[in-house]
Each structure stands twice: as C-alpha cells, then as structure tokens.
Amino acid sequence: MSTSLFRNPKFLRYFLSQGSSQLAYQMLVVAVGWQMYDLTNSALSLGLIGLVQFLPQLLLALVAGHVADRHDRRRIASVCMLAQGSIGAVLAAGSLGGWINSETIYACAFLLGAARTFQSPAMQSMLPSLVDRSVFPTAINYTTAARNFSSIAGPALGGGIYLFGAGAVYSTCTALYGLASVLIVGLGAKIAAGREPATLKSVFAGMSYIRSKPDILGAISMDLFAVLLGGVTALLPIYARDILHTGPEGLGLLRAGPAAGALLMTAFLARVPLKRRVGHAMYAGVAVFGLGTIVFALSHSLILSLLMLMLLGAGDMISVVVRSTLVQLETPDHMRGRVTAVNSIFLGTSSQLGQFQTGSVAALVGAVPAAVIGGIGTLIVVALWIKLFPSLFNRDTLNAHPEESQ
C-alpha cells in the first residue's frame, strides 16, 4: 500500500514540492537568525523577526483559508513558493552586495510570513484530492516525515553553507523554492473545493466550527499556549554563540534538534500508533516539552542541549499527531481550508509570536531565565487545560465521538 503512493505521480510531485519548500524555509530561517544577531547583537531583534512574520498571518489567515476553499489550490501554492524564492533572491543580493541591514530583513520576514499564510491552507487542503481515502493516513505519515526530515536537514545544511556566507544560503533557498513551485504547478488538474460566495459568515466559518468542537479547540489552544510560553527557537542564536560557544554550524544542529526528535517519534508512532488514552498521551507530550525546555535552559553542554531539544521535539510530536488527526477526521472537505487557516493562526501565534515573547523576556531578564520561565509556564498550561478541557484529557481514541459523527 505504501509503495503505491509513490507510483502516483501527483502524490510524488506534491511530496517532493513540500519537501523542497520546507527545506528552503528551514535553511533560510537559520541564515536570517544568525545574520540578524551578527548585525544587531540583540535578543529583542531576534524576537521581532517572529513578530513581523506573525502579523500577516494574523491579518490574512482567515482570508487565505477562504481563498483555498474557492480557488485553484495548486496555483495558489505555486505562486506563494515563487514569492518566497524572490524574497530569498533579495536577501542574497543584499548579502552579496553588502547593503543588507536589519530593516531589509524585517521587510523580507513580513513578506515571507504573508506568502506562507496563503501557502499553508492551500497545500494542506490539497492532499485529500490527490490520493485515495484508503491510503490517506499513510500519505499523512509520509508528508509529516518529509517535513520533519527537512526540518533536520535544512538547519544543518543552512548552518554549513553559511560558512561560505549568508548569500550562498539565500541563493540555495531561491533555487529550492523555484523547484518546489514547478513541481506543484505540474500537478496539472485544477484543485479547489468549491465556490461558496465570500461573506463575513463564510470567512469566519472555520472559527465557528472549531469553537463548536471542544476537543479540537482544547488541543489547538493547549499547543498555542505551551509553545508560546515554552518555545526557545528565538534564543538559539544566543545559546549557540554566547552559552554553548559554537558557530553557525552549531546553530544549525540546535535548530535541527526538535525536528530530529519529532522524526524519531514519528517512526515510533508508525510502529506503535496511538489507539487508546490519546488524551493522556497528548497532555504527557506537552509536559515533556515543558520539562525538556527547562533542562535545555540550564544546560551548558552542546550534547545535552541537543538531546533536550530532541526530547521536547518528540513530546511536541505527540501533540501534533493528536491535533492534526482530530482536525482531519472531524472536518468536512469543503471547510478544510478555512479550518486549516484557523489552525495556522494558532500555530503562528505559538511559534512566531512566541519568538517575539521569548526574545522580549530575554532582553529584560536574560536568555537563561527567559527559557526557564517559559518551561515552567508550559507545565502550568498542562495543569490548567486538564481542568478546562476534561473531555480532551479523558479522550480514549482518535475516532469521532458518536455524537460528533451524526
């Protein structure tokens, strides 16, 4: 069954396009983070990169979801990838020409966030129309594994190529985005879910749907606050240079750590899938994320720090599997773009806005106290969400409850 997926030329193009795009993005963010810290020597500036990427997501995500449910998802994704490649070209030109500055990086980060806002619901909503329902769970596993692999290889490659200069990294990203765009547009057939008229109600339909599903709302919101408080991505350049005393190649390894842990957890869950007590497993995964963050914060060893990043990535992956499966199983096809867009707002808030929050706290109290506070905050969120969403905590299986399937 699994090999038949790769005999499907549409799935193969989708798989390779997603992998190329994710690889390019991961390489780009490593270069941007290291270059910005070199230019400014400021923790706050690292956090601001996350904020400016998040703003277009906050402003445009609901519109992007509606667009994905009304128009050709293939072309939307292709144009967004070309836009990101163009951003990489501007950063490469600025780095090679010596005129790059923090303002240029902020502007490019904003445009990058806007392009990814429209790409995300289009790409994620496209997959069900490319494969048979019988192999859809397997397709999800493969695409998740590809994203995780890219999140490992991308930072490592980006950090290594950065030894030849930031322009070399950005130029490579531009080429990868171009490849991804060509692959996805080559799917051929128009892929769109419907032509529902654009109204205020239809644009906000995804939000209303999630609000009506307590388990989905609980899963998404717990991930939001846990990563918002406990994420340490923005601090990695500081840890790499000032605490662990390594270079851009070390930063690449650190950025790859969470994805490496997630990939290992993906392989484990493929052999031992979550079948029972999935709610308990999700909460335990988020708690492990918080504990790993605290130990990472206090570490002065590159090896221990990398292991803790892998551990928190593995814990987060459990939460990702439960949340993603709930959304996929309980969302009708014609609303998947809008629900995915709302989900992306929550995820963007936790990652990009989380970077700003962490960078701001670090600017006030230092990187180590900021990371420790974040890890403790994650554990508090887990305890609160047990009380606020008891049905999610006690959920036994990933299948829809009887009343939800009616």
Image (cartoon, rainbow, N blue to C red):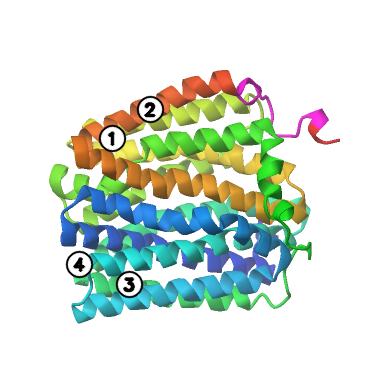
- In three-dimensional space, the C-alpha distance between marks 4 and 3, rounded to whole angstroms, equals 13 Å
Q: Which mark is residue 371?
A: 1
Give the number of callouts: 4
Amino acid type of disc 3? Tyr
**Figure quadrant of the C terminus:** top right
**Figure quadrant of the N terminus:** bottom right
Q: Which residues are magenta?
A: 389-403
| Crowd band around label 4 with a 10 angstrom C-alpha radius: few (<14), some (14–19), many (20+) | few
Amino acid type of disc 1? Ala
Q: Earlier in the sequence, mark 4 or mark 1?
A: 4
Amino acid type of disc 2? Gly
**Secondary structure mostly taken by the magenta-highlighted segment of the chain:** loop
In which image quadrant can residue 160 be found? bottom left
Q: Earlier in the sequence, mark 3 or mark 2?
A: 3
Q: Which residue is mark 2?
A: 377
**Which SS class for mark 2?**
helix
